[in-house]
Amino acid sequence: MSLNVGVREVDGVTIVDLAGRITLGDASSGKLRETVREILGKGAKKVILNLGDVSYIDSSGLGELVSTYTTASNQGAKVKLLNVQKKVQDLLQITKLYTVFDTFDNEADAVLSFS
Amino acid sequence: MADPRSLELKLESKVDSVDAAELIVQGLAREAGHPEDEIDHLGMAVRESMVNAVTHGNGYSAEKWVYFSARVEKDGGLRVGIRDEGEGFEPRGVPDPTAPENLLKTSGRGLLLMRALVDEFSVERAEPRGMQVTMFKKGPGAKRG
C-alpha cells in the first residue's frame, strides 16, 4: 500500500492528511518530502501532519518525519503531529522522538496550539 | 501447537526482498498463534534488519545476497536469522539515536527498534564477511519477562 497525501487549510494552518505506509522504497517518503517542500515554498509556517490513517512507519519513515521537521524549522515553520496511531506512538516512544514532536489527538486543539 | 518448521532463503539485495521477508515472518508468526501486535513488532524488526542488510550491508549490489532463515519452534517461538555480505561494522560503534545530539538525525534508528521489538537480539560480524543478525520472539504462550 502506498501513501496518499491530501493538503487542506484550516484557520491559516496547513494540514497534510496522510494515509497508508511511510516506508523505505515505496515512494511514500519521497511523496511526503515533496509535498512538504511545496507547501513550505508557498510560505506555510504552521503545518500539521495528520497521521490518523497511517498504519505503518518504519525507521526510514521516522527519518522522513524528522527531515520534515528540520526542513520546516530551517524555514521558520513548525510541524506538529495529529492522530498518531498506537503503533506509531510506540515507535516515537522507543526512539524518544516524542520529545521532538508536539502531538495531538484532536484537530481543533492542534490548530489552536499555533495561535 | 505448531510443528517445528524452518526455511532458508537466499534473497536478492532489493527492496522487494525486504517486503518478502517481512511477509514470510508475519505469516509464520500468525500461523504459530502470535497476537497481532506481536506479529507487527516481529515484522517490523525483520524489516529493519533486512533494510540494513540490503542497503547498508550489500548496497543494493546484484552480486551480493541476503541469507534469510526462519524457524518456528514447538511452542511457537520464532527465530530469524539475516546475514548480509557487506563490509560489516562494529555494533558498539553505532551512536545512540536517542541521545539529544542525535535525535534530529534522519537515520540510525534501525538497531534500536530491532532490539526493542523482539525478545532476544544479537548482531555480530559474520564469516567470511558481512553481519549476522539473530532475533527471537517467544512463543505466544511463553511468559514475558
Image: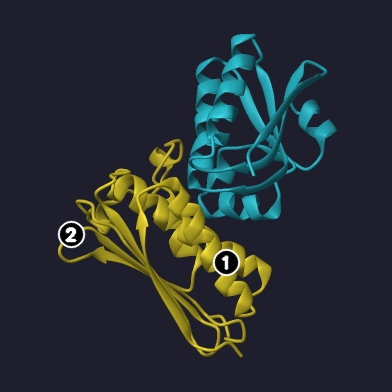
Chain colours: A cyan, B yellow
At 52% from the left edge and 80% from the top edge, which residue is drawn? B138
State which quadrant residue B92 falls in: bottom left
**Can residue B42 be seen at all in this image of the molecule?**
no
The structure residue drawn at horizontal position 54% and vertical position 34%, both measured from the top left corner, is A27
Give the image quarter of residue A23. Answer: top right
Disc 2 designates what residue? B129
Q: How many marks?
A: 2
A63 to the left or right of A14: left
Residue linked to disc 1: B26
Are the residues flagged by discs 1 and 2 from a single subunit? yes
- B83 lies above or below A54: below
Q: Residue A54: percent from the left, percent from the top?
A: 68, 44
Horizontal arrangement in the rendering, residue A60 relative to residue B32 (left or right): left
Q: Verify CB contact (< 8 Å) between mark 1 and mark 2.
A: no
Residue A65 image-quadrant placement: top right
Left or right of B32 on screen, residue B118? left
Q: Earlier in the sequence, mark 1 or mark 2?
A: 1
**B88 is higher (above) or lower (below) than A65:** below
Is B36 situated above or below A95? Answer: below
Q: Position of residue A57 (x, y in %)?
A: 58, 47
Left or right of residue B57, residue A69 in this image: right
Subunit ID for the residue under disc 2: B
Instruction: Provide residue B73's location: percent of width, then percent of height.
Output: 48, 86
- Identify the residue at the far top of this view: A42
Quarter of the picture holding the N terminus of chain B: bottom right
Residue type (three-letter) at the residue carrying disc 1: Gln
Q: What is the crowding at mark 1: few (fewer than 14 residues within 10 Å), some, or many (at least 20)? A: many
